[in-house]
Amino acid sequence: MPAIVVLGAQWGDEGKGKATDLLTTDDAIDYCVRTSGGHNAGHTIVVNGERFATHLLPSGILTPDCTSVIANGVVVSPEALFRELDALEARNVDMGRLVVSANAHVIASYHSTVDKVTERFLGKNKIGTTGRGIGPAYADKINRVGIRIADLFDEQILHEKVEAALELKNHLLTKVYNRRAITVDEVVEELRGYADRLEPMVADTSLLLNQALDEGRTVLFEGAQATMLDVDHGTYPFVTSSSPVAGGVCVGAGIGPTRIDRVIGVIKAYTTRVGSGPFPTELFDDDGAKLWEIGGEVGVSTGRDRRCGWYDAVVARYASRVNGLTEFFMTKLDVLSSWEQIPVCVAYEIDGERHDEMPMTQSMFHRAKPVYEHLDGWGDDISGCRTFEELPKNAQRYVRALEEMSGSRFWAVGVGPGREQTLVVS
Ligand code: GDP
Ligand code: IMO
Ligand code: MG
């Protein structure tokens, strides 16, 4: 199985870090690659009870034999990158090698400035971004005024590019947002300051990954964000500015679609979302508070509370379809252990009509009301189970029922954050 994609099937924070870590340690993964997003991600890995969080770095960095790759589709804040590397070094983590694409776009401090002022300007219509400059960096890329990693190594080119990048931004900052202008020199100085440390890590990562696949090496593409946050296929405009779906992996890494063997959608046994935007199964009652509490639903990157709701099989089927999933990895089944009955959304009711598939328009999705089926709970703590057969019968039935309605087979189920708390569905 040379090329495996792991991606989020809901609105993020499904447990992609755990899935990646599991595959990286069990299946001798040679390369672990991030292909989209930036340090807006927060992926948690728990190894022998010790908790690690990765943001911009691929989770494979925690596996010494694994080469981690930040590919061309990622937006890279060198400051965040070094902060993350330093934090792992300070914990004496035996890290793998890290390679960064020369073509990846750079997030400079002006991107997070623009991100924050734009959000403030949007007021009640704000997206609820992470404030990390992700949207403005991708906007510059598409507007063809972005700075790429390779530009940091040539002062003259960098100067010209920063000048082009700041021209319109300074008009906006000073005349619309009432902020001070940013000087070209201060940005060039900031970015040049990263060049020496960065240079040995830089490579043509598309060439590297294609050669690795030609040699039969195993490459894991670790998704960030999720299907419902995809700029094309998510709940636009309440999305991130990249393409976290499976198709985005090819663009973000410079590999062809025929290379990919497995596409694993990570999905929680319920649903969470951070930031603004529609969420049909969201709960505002005690059940929501209980999911939040038992699930520990607080963001890894921003510390914001995650909104909580029941499992949404319409979202699962949609994720299965737009990503061409070969399987799901379901996490956090253990969180549901204390409910006698567990509602699961099987369809939506929109303006009196039943919809079994994701509605065509965003405004319909905003009006979608969940149609619930109630499944029996199991009542026992399952976090100590180590095989699928050890699960109480009703927990097995819950998993099988969800598998039936979600559009792809279930490969494994998580019953706790630890590496060992994963049950392969037989
Ligand atoms: P990611 O962004 O998709 O990598 O997910 P996050 O790390 O942001 O959030 C997932 C959270 O769930 C983390 O705190 C994980 O340690 C935790 N987690 C993952 N799988 C399980 C599971 O099966 N059970 C429980 N209780 N927690 C899990
Ligand atoms: P991981 O990889 C959950 C959300 C933000 C906001 C929207 C846009 O840990 O699953 P952005 O800063 O990207 O412009 O914000 O996307 N968002 C995430 N939500 N998990 C993430 O990453 C997210 N990355 C971005 O909350 O609603
Ligand atoms: Mg996360």
Image (cartoon, helix red, strand yellow):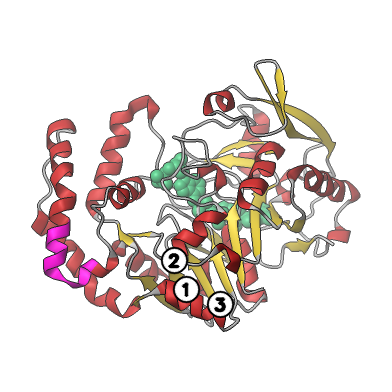
Mark 1 vs 2: CB contact within 8 A = yes
Q: Is residue 351 left or right of residue 30?
A: right
Q: Earlier in the sequence, mark 1 or mark 3?
A: 1
For the residue pair 424 and 354, the one nearer the viewer reads as 354
Check the picture and name the quadrant holding the C terminus. Answer: bottom right
Q: Which residues are magenta?
A: 151-161
Q: Which SS class for mark 2?
A: loop
- Is 86 drawn above or below residue 283 in the view shown? below
Location of residue 14 with respect to 173 vertically, above or below:
below
C-alpha separation, residue under disc 1 versus residue under disc 3: 15 Å
Secondary element at image label 1: strand
Looking at the rendered structure, the kind of residue marked 1 is Ser
- Which residue is pictured at 65% across the width and 16% down the height? 351
Q: Which residue is mark 2?
A: 57
Q: Position of residue 146 (x, y in %)?
A: 26, 55
Q: Earlier in the sequence, mark 1 or mark 2?
A: 2
The residue that disc 1 covers is 68
Q: Nearer the viewer, mark 1 or mark 3?
A: 3
Q: Amino acid at mark 2?
A: Leu
Density class for disc 3 (Cα within 10 Å; few <14, some 14-19, many ≥20) is some
Residue ID for mark 3: 213
The three-letter code of the residue at mark 3 reads Leu
What is the C-alpha distance between the residues marked 1 and 2?
Answer: 8 Å
Which residue is depicted at the point 40% across and 56% down? 39
Q: x and y percent of residue 257 in the render? A: 56, 62
- CA gap between label 3 and label 2 equals 21 Å
Q: Is residue 376 above or below residue 78?
A: above
Magenta run includes residue 158: yes
Write down the quadrant of residue 148 in the picture: bottom left
